[in-house]
């Protein structure tokens, strides 16, 4: 069986997801029955496109084509033609589209093949859930998702529980949660605590991750240290003197070591699919503070693995509790167990392989 994955947004947590996916499906035993090709765009700033081939499994085929995030009629048309050309050459049995842009371009390219294919689609966070766009734009995105599902068919594979509830309203869907390589992450996990409580996030500094809120929290708690592991175009919004911006780590292990060095993980996102970085923090036994939104609330169990918050004032009591080593350790242990039970990439990708077949 030939499976092709198509992804435009190869960056951040999605990059980690695909790297893990490549090693699972690139394993000799699985590759005997199921050959995998990943068609991707290397345009995201937070990745080094030259490193992709060396960091992904040799057991999968990689094809880079130019796809852009924003709407561009000419570039999008060229991308569709290029996708159709590659798909015609491969002649896959299954095509799995990832994120909104690939969901649109990929479905059109599949239609132009004039052959019926088994199509799956994972939103990794529906675009109509964004909070930085107008209500009219949200309605347009909702219409695109609904109409493309009806016109071109396919099955949605939701990456989180709430995304699954939404997907069921649009069309046929399944739930296969995002997962991580827990063993790999735990190799960088060493018991660690700081003299001053240190709170961190791993993300690109964009409006989706809400650096303004992160900055406001740092100003509200001047006696604590804050670390933003990553970089991005909105780094100018992180002005609090107790914030450290690490910049990008091109070696993933260096980023994981920096993650290990914090005491509490915080996710300030405005919208999410199901955040990989939160799962990695949980695998490292970090308690998690997260905004009460789709994605975050599918991972964090309040008062067990961390806390969800709607207003910044709620953090006063939460952080006071998390200053206690015993509470942090208890929450961290609970977080690790939840991650192991629900978000192990080997278990979840095995379910995905079974669905393809």
Image (cartoon, rainbow, N blue to C red):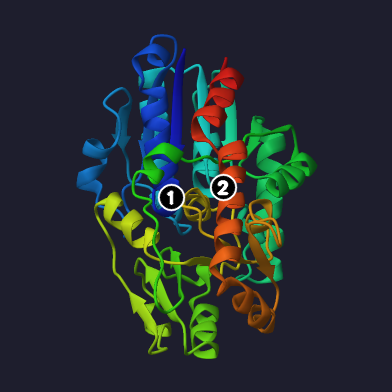
Pointer 1 or 2: first along the chain: 1
Q: How many marks?
A: 2
Where does the C terminus fall, quadrant-wise? top right
Residue position for label 2: 124
Circle nearer the viewer, 1 or 2: 2
**Image check: 200 left or right of 47?**
right
Q: Is residue 226 visible?
A: yes
In the image shown, does 61 or 285 lie closer to the viewer? 285
Q: Residue at x 64, y 78 (%)?
A: 315
Query: Is there a contact, CB below 8 Å, between mark 1 and mark 2?
Result: yes
Label 2: few (<14), some or many (≥20) within 10 Å? many
Q: Secondary structure at mark 1?
A: loop
**Image check: 311 left or right of 182?**
right
Residue 331, quarter of the rendered image = bottom right
Q: Is residue 111 visible?
A: no
The x, y position of residue 13, in whole percent, is 45, 51
The answer to whether residue 56 is above or below residue 73 is above
Q: Residue at x 27, y 56 (%)?
A: 254
Q: Residue at x 59, y 24 (%)?
A: 351
């Amino acid at each position: 069986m030939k499976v092709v994955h198509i992804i435009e947004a190869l960056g951040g947590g999605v990059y980690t997801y695909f790297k893990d996916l490549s090693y699972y499906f690139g394993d000799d035993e699985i590759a005997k029955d199921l050959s995998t090709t990943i068609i991707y765009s290397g345009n995201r700033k937070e990745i080094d496109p030259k490193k992709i081939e060396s960091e992904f499994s040799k057991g999968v085929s990689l094809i880079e084509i130019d796809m852009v995030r924003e709407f561009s009629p000419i570039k999008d048309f060229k991308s569709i033609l290029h996708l159709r050309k590659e798909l015609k050459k491969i002649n896959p049995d299954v095509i799995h589209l990832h994120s909104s842009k690939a969901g649109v371009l990929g479905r059109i390219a599949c239609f132009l093949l004039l052959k019926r294919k088994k199509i799956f689609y994972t939103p990794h966070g529906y675009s109509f859930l964004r909070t930085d766009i107008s209500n009219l734009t949200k309605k347009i995105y909702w219409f695109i998702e609904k109409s493309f599902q009806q016109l071109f068919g396919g099955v949605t594979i939701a990456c989180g529980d709430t995304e699954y509830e939404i997907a069921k309203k649009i069309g046929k869907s399944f739930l296969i949660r995002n997962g991580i390589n827990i063993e790999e992450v735990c190799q960088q996990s060493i018991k660690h605590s700081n003299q001053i409580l240190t709170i961190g996030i791993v993300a690109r500094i964009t409006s989706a991750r809400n650096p303004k809120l992160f900055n406001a929290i740092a100003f509200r708690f001047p006696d604590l240290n804050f670390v933003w592991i990553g970089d991005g175009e909105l780094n100018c919004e992180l002005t609090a003197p107790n914030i450290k911006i690490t910049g990008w780590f091109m070696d993933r292990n260096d980023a994981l070591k920096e993650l290990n060095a914090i005491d509490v993980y915080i996710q300030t996102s405005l919208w999410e699919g199901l955040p990989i970085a939160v799962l990695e923090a949980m695998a490292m036994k970090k308690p998690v503070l997260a905004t009460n939104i789709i994605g975050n609330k599918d991972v964090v169990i309040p008062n067990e693995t961390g806390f969800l918050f709607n207003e910044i004032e709620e953090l006063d009591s939460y952080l006071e509790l998390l200053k206690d080593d015993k509470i942090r350790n208890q929450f961290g242990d609970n977080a690790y167990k939840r991650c192991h039970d629900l978000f192990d990439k080997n278990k979840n990708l095995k379910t995905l392989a079974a669905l393809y077949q």
